[in-house]
Amino acid sequence: MAAYYNEIDPYAAQWLRNLIDAGHIAPGDVDERDIRDVAPDDLAGYRQCHFFAGIGGWPLALRIAGVPDAYPCWTGSPPCQDASVAGAIWGVRSGLAGNRTSLVGNWLDLIDAVRPSALAFENVPGLKPWIGEITGRLAGAGYRVSEPKCSTKDVGGPHLRRRLWVIADRDGEGFQEPRAAGSSAPFSDPRRTPPGDFWVATASRACGLDDGFPRRVDAVRAFGNAIDPWAAASVIKDYREGRAA
């Protein structure tokens, strides 16, 4: 059964299609509409739904964690600009009241309407003052909610990249279904892999004068907005194994 990907940025949306065509993430349909235009009925028939899908970090993380493509779950990594450190520096950190980060409310509205079995959420640490509003809505909708701790450094990365994580399930069995025996995820467990095996060093610490051509800007923005799939996979594995905080 196909997965659903919601991503408003055309460049990232095409990236998702390329990843799907290459078999790197679950097969499915990419919807470029604003999440505010997505109705619950539009999601009928989809087992996995990935909102603010970016360049496919969550579906890749699910595969790394051994979660089958057909496993029913939703993910969301809403825009972080209104909760970021940069926003705080400029004195405009408005959190869930901001124009972009407030879109998490639309994601929660769809959850209320459809009630998926399991959920995974990621955002910047700056959202911490508002995370209780998100977990409170999920708990009120009948979800068991956990806030695991994991940074990129925890899975062998060369930098810290702290994030807020929320994992939730409705029936106490979220992410419990293992990948079939004999099959494996396309990438190894990051906690058992030397960092050099999958972390790529940057070519240069300085940008040339030609830096900033449109296609490069699109790619840099897409990478900058992406989640760390190995950290996300670790969070899911720990939750499944009962080690989440």
Image (cartoon, grey):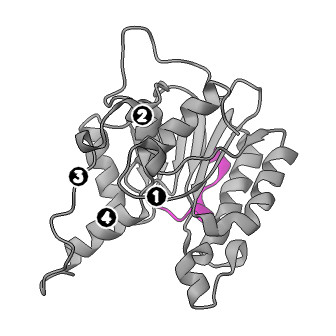
- Give residue 191's mark: 2
Residue wearing tag 3: 200
Quarter-of-image position of residue 21: top left
Q: Say which residue label 1 marks.
A: 160
> How far from the left and from the top, in percent, is residue 38?
59, 57
Residue 83 screen position, x and y as percent? 62, 73
Nearest to the observer: residue 89 or residue 79: 89
Q: Earlier in the sequence, mark 4 or mark 2?
A: 4
Q: CA distance from mark 4 to mark 2?
A: 31 Å
Pick the front one: 103 or 155: 155
Marks 1 and 3 sit apart, C-alpha to C-alpha, by 15 Å
**In this view of the protein, can residue 79 be seen by the observer?**
yes
Q: What residue is disc 4 on?
A: 11
Residue plotted at (43% across, 50% down): 228
Quick check: 162 left or right of 218?
Answer: right
Q: Is residue 37 magenta?
A: yes
Counting residues from the N terminus, which is met first, the one under dot 1 or under dot 2?
A: 1
Q: What amino acid is found at the position of numbered circle 2 in the picture?
A: Arg
Give the residue at x 57% y 91%: 90
> Label 1 is placed on what type of residue?
Leu
Residue at left 71%, top 47%? Answer: 111
Cα gap from disc 3 to disc 4, whole angstroms: 22 Å
- Of callouts 3 and 4, which one flags the residue occurring earlier in the amino acid sequence? 4
Distance, label 1 to label 4, CA atoms, is: 27 Å
- Sequence-earlier tag: 3 or 2: 2
Range shown magenta: 33-41
3 and 2 marks in contact (CB < 8 Å): no
- Helix, strand or loop for disc 3: loop
